[in-house]
Amino acid sequence: MGQSARFYTSATASVNYIYKSWFALMKRFQSQLDGKLRWLEMLNSDTELVEASGVSLDVLQTKSAEILAQFASQNPAETQPAKGKKTKKGLKKKISQSDN
């Protein structure tokens, strides 16, 4: 009471802005948490996998090894480590030599 309308409007806008940003942050955090929970649900123990699939653990392991081997043969560049990485020191040395 007794304050100007500009002060009231500014205070209302500030409070609205703070609450909207807080709710946006909470929504983002909740979606991140949901994603992590969804990922954790996919990581089942061996007994849960056997119960869910209805086959033995040996069959699951051999099938997963086959799938991994199939992807490894399709992407040989990704499985091999990168060679010949240049360090910053070596790069700076080459630049300074080329400037000379």
Image (cartoon, rainbow, N blue to C red):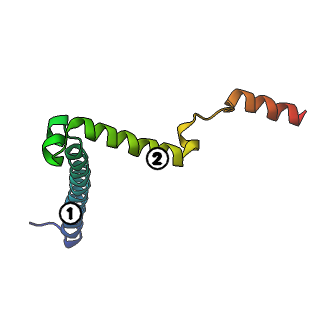
Residue 66, image x, y percentages: 39, 43
Name the residue that disc number 1 marks.
11
Above or below for 19 versus 91: below
Above or below for 43 versus 88: below
- Tag 2: amino acid: Phe
Residue 92, image x, y percentages: 75, 31
Marking on residue 58:
none
Looking at the image, which residue sits at the far left? 1
Marking on residue 71:
2
Q: Please report the residue visible at 17 percent of the width from the left and 41 percent of the height from the top.
A: 50
Q: Please report the residue visible at 22 percent of the width from the left and 48 percent of the height from the top.
A: 33
Q: Residues within 10 Å of mark 2 (few under 14, many from 20)?
A: few
Question: Which of the two discs, 1 and 2, sits closer to the camera?
Answer: 2
Circle nearer the N terminus (1, 2): 1
How many numbered dots are placed on residues in this image? 2
Is 29 displayed left or right of 93 in the figure? left
Q: Which quarter of the figure has residue 31?
A: bottom left
The one of 13 and 3 positioned closer to us in this rendering:
13
Q: Which quarter of the figure has residue 88?
A: top right
The one of 27 and 71 positioned closer to us in this rendering:
71
Residue 45, image x, y percentages: 19, 36
- Tag 1: amino acid: Ala
Secondary structure type for disc 1: helix
Q: Which quarter of the figure has residue 7?
A: bottom left
Secondary structure type for disc 2: helix
Q: Residues within 10 Å of mark 1 (few under 14, many from 20)?
A: few
Q: Please report the residue visible at 26 percent of the width from the left and 40 percent of the height from the top.
A: 59
Is 63 displayed left or right of 89 in the figure? left
